[in-house]
């Protein structure tokens, strides 16, 4: 499934403030309903994660795991994934069951 990207800081801030959060030691997920026509995804990794190489790897791992989990249409939601310190050292296959559980807890049927 193809999804839209969250790019503006105000869209991320809305997801952080109004969205429901789901926390795991590997990743934090914020879910918020939107009025856009598609599901929008945002991937972030702060400087706490590491240098630029580590942050890019964390986003790459989250994107790969998300492509495995997000197969069907989940509705019109903003989904923001925030990397934790251990995320760049994971394989995407280890992150897939975590994201599946988070999506199930959030009520997003994929």
Image: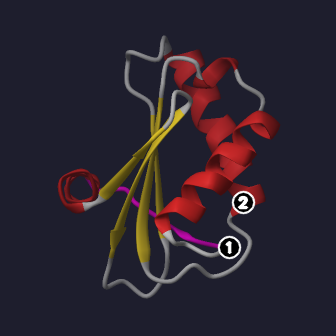
Residue 50 image point, x, y percent: 48, 12
Asked if residue 11 is positioned above or below residue 51 in the image, the reply reads: below
Cα distance in 3D space between marks 2 and 1? 7 Å
- Label at residue 6: none
Q: Residue at x 71, y 24 (%)?
A: 90
Examine the structure image and report whether residue 37 is included in the region drawn in magenta.
no
Q: Residue at x 28, y 53 (%)?
A: 12
- Label at residue 110: 1
Residue 18 image point, x, y percent: 20, 61
Q: Residue at x 40, y 60 (%)?
A: 6
Secondary structure mostly taken by the magenta-highlighted segment of the chain: loop
Residue 70 image point, x, y percent: 68, 66
* Label 2 environment density (alpha carbons within 10 Å; few <14, some 14–19, many ≥20): some
Could you say which is closer to the camera, residue 41 or residue 104?
104
Q: Which residue is mark 2?
A: 69
Q: Which residues are magenta?
A: 2-8
Asked if residue 1 is positioned above or below residue 52 in the image, the reply reads: below
Is residue 31 found left or right of 4 in the rendered image?
Answer: left
Asked if residue 79 is positioned above or below residue 99 in the image, the reply reads: below
Can you say which quadrant of the picture contains the C terminus? Answer: bottom right
User: SS class of the residue under badge 2?
Assistant: helix
């Amino acid at each position: 499934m193809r999804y839209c990207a969250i790019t503006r800081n105000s869209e991320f801030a809305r997801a952080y403030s109004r969205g429901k959060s789901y926390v795991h030691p590997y990743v934090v997920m914020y879910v918020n309903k939107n009025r856009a026509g598609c599901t929008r995804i945002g991937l972030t990794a702060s400087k706490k994660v590491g240098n630029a190489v580590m942050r890019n790897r964390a986003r790459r791992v989250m994107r790969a795991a998300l492509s495995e989990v997000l197969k069907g249409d989940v509705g019109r939601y903003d989904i923001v994934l925030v990397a934790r310190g251990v995320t760049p050292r994971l394989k995407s296959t280890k992150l897939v069951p975590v994201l599946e559980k988070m999506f199930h807890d959030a009520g997003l049927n994929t």
